[in-house]
Amino acid sequence: MATFLYKLGRTAFRRRRLVALLWVALLALAGVGAATAPTATSSSFSIPGTEAQRAFDLLEERFPGAGADGATARVVFKAPEGEKMTDPAHKAVVEETVAALRSGSDQIVQVTDPYTAHAVSQDGSTAYVSVSYEVNAMELTDETREALTRAGLGAQGKGLTVEVGGDALQTMPEQGASEAIGIVLAGIVLVVTFGSLVAAGLPLLTAIIGVGIGVSSITALANVLDLGTTTSTLASMIGLAVGIDYALFIVSRYRAELAEGRTKEDAAGRAVGTAGSAVVFAGLTVVIALVGLAVVNIPMLTKMGFAAAGTVVIAVLIALTLIPALLGFAGDKVVSRKQRKAAKGGEGAKGGEAAAGAGAKPNGGTRWARFVIRRPLMVLIVGVLGLGAIAVPAASLEMGLPDDGVKPTSTTERRAYDALSDGFGPGFNGPLLVVVDGDKATADRTVSTIKGLGGWAAVTPATPNKAGDAAMITVVPKDRPSSAATEDLVHDIRDATGDGVLVTGATAMNIDFSQKMNDALVPYLALVVGLAFVLLTLVFRSVLVPLKAALGFLLSVVAALGAVVAVFQWGWLGGLFGVEQTGPIMSMMPIFMVGVVFGLAMDYEVFLVTRMREAYVHGQRPGEAIVTGFRHSARVVTAAAVIMIAVFSGFIGMDDQMVKMIGFGLAAAVLFDAFVVRMAIVPAVLALLGRKAWWLPKWLDRILPNVDVEGEGLAASADGPGAARPDLVKV
């Protein structure tokens, strides 16, 4: 592989104008496709095989036009102290609002009058108007949302406190600012790392081009493939992350090859042949993790995974072709001004990064590697125990989907949530919908059965459909939607009623979604870690190195989950991260973290350990190989990790609780994996294992193809100075 990629890199360097033109044309084509494609709608959210989904399907079949899975809103009115919502003046304001809502949008199915629907609290202080829409929240038009908000504001200035809640106000979080902050921080780190604005700008430029092509392609194909408006979120996040990483490693290797005295064309070829090989396999691990989301069998996650995997493939191709082409345009400016001056003074052949290996002052990576080699057992114990302690809260993980109750008190959704809880009880924000597949007698018996259970605050009479072969029953829990008591009530209803009775609603859907994610976690881990183990065995030609990589990854992910539980579920340091209300951890968080962090973790593993393997194959002792790997790669891996932490941390400042949680979890996972696992535990384990770390059974060695990630095939090449390596050994 290294030889093929070497030729590819040289070709891209020589024909840089053609390569750059092709990528610019591809970006323009994707942009035109996105601009001319019809506006994408949100693909419907479904959870195949769950009771809540079967109930929704039954509602759509037996209650056509009811908008069972449509968006909902509640306009909540609260009277001033000492007054009631039944007062004539207040009643007139509410009725005006109802009329305004009914005429505000053609997407509305129903608007209920609180005075005829018994939606006034017992003390008369609170009332609400329910609004049902025919489409889900992501498909609501801006005009519909504006009409809802306008109706609420119209009543606000007439003596009442008015708040609007429900998922109708739900929109995709604006990520432009967070991504911009991440890019700026990434640029600063790259400038510090390379000491050259040109070298720092290349990874940013190519990452933006890759994300632009990927996201534009998703937008262009959204309607054809039913991708929806949420699909590009993960693609842009991952594409930006790996795009910067992959370009960073190749540019760094190119500078190192130049420092050894190679010509620019040969340096570009060797950078792609060696670091590019690592990019290919690192990219494959990310693709495996993302495509593996299909195991969960939730269409939305599957589409997000495939779309993000496509963006990663684009990032790999850009790193292998566009980067060497742009290096050809950059010329000498890709190295720092100090190195260019040294080169003019005759020191360039052995200057720069090569100096570290020729008796120059050891860099930070070298000093740290030598420290770990001297005390590997101590470093290993401290690292494992430290992450183990942080992981302890993960044993108390409670999964669910955060509701309006965890939003900041500055939002109208949170204030509406609190007003309904105060006026009608905490369970009123998460009513359960029981669907009976049977006649009125069956429905009445179901009502009696539910009333015989505990945990409910109200049970409405059964509402049959026109055909009389199905009915709906609304059950209001005593406790808040995300509580364990409400979850128990759902299970009790399902256990006490027959097969023809199905429980759904937002709370039941969340419970089923959490269970499905939980059930899929072990198969997903087995698939992703298993395939990656095979891939890393092929790369490193070792059994113990991939095993160590997988175990270290699991340790860092569990530690990150422990940190998420401590902050978002227990409330530790919650004020520091803007967590106003604790609650369950988002259901998809474990699998999401496994998929995203596994790919990034294997990136760092491949780039760091491949350089060690390369040094070992070229004749160095195991300890020397570890130091060599850190001398060449630690600075770059550290920069890549800092960039990723900065990008993900940018999402912590957002108001949306789920986005905040994702940003915190991913930033913590990268921090733990890059700086504790890869920088401490990995070299400690390799130092303890010695030559055994690179052991591979002879029968397996004969079976596995030689992919030549270390560039052994390039050692005999005479294409540039320093090409021959007489100390090359075969292991």
Image (spheres, rainbow, N blue to C red):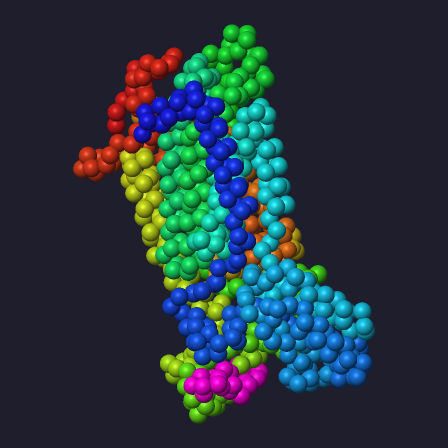
**What is the x, y in percent for residue 583?**
56, 64
Q: Is residue 642 above or below residue 476?
A: above
Left or right: residue 268 compared with residue 458: left
Quarter containing the N terminus: top left
Residue 76 placement (x, y as % from top left): 69, 73
**Foreground pick, 699 / 704:** 704
Residue 30 seen in the current view: yes
- Quick check: is 583 in the magenta stretch? no
Percent from the top left, x then y, of residue 460? Answer: 55, 86
The answer to whether residue 185 is above or below residue 386 is above
Q: Is residue 267 visible?
A: no
Q: Which residues are magenta?
A: 453-473
Q: Which x, y percent locates residue 425?
A: 63, 78
Splitting the image into 4 quarters, where does residue 513 fall? bottom left
Q: Is residue 456 magenta?
A: yes
Would residue 506 be found to the left or right of residue 595 on screen?
A: right
The residue at 45%/56% (across/down) is: 226
Q: Residue furthest top?
A: 346
Instruction: Name above or below for residue 157 compared with residue 271.
Output: below
Q: Residue furthest bottom?
A: 441
Question: Toward the viewer: 266 or 613?
Answer: 266
Residue depicted at x 53% and y 41%: 31
Residue at left 42%, top 59%?
Answer: 299
Q: Is residue 94 left or right of residue 529?
A: right
Q: From the viewer's perspective, is 662 left or right of 181? A: left
Which residue lies at the image location 61% right of the left edge and 51% below the top edge?
174
Question: Number of callouts in the render?
Answer: 0
- 342 or 620, nearer to the observer: 342
Image quarter where the C terminus lies is top left
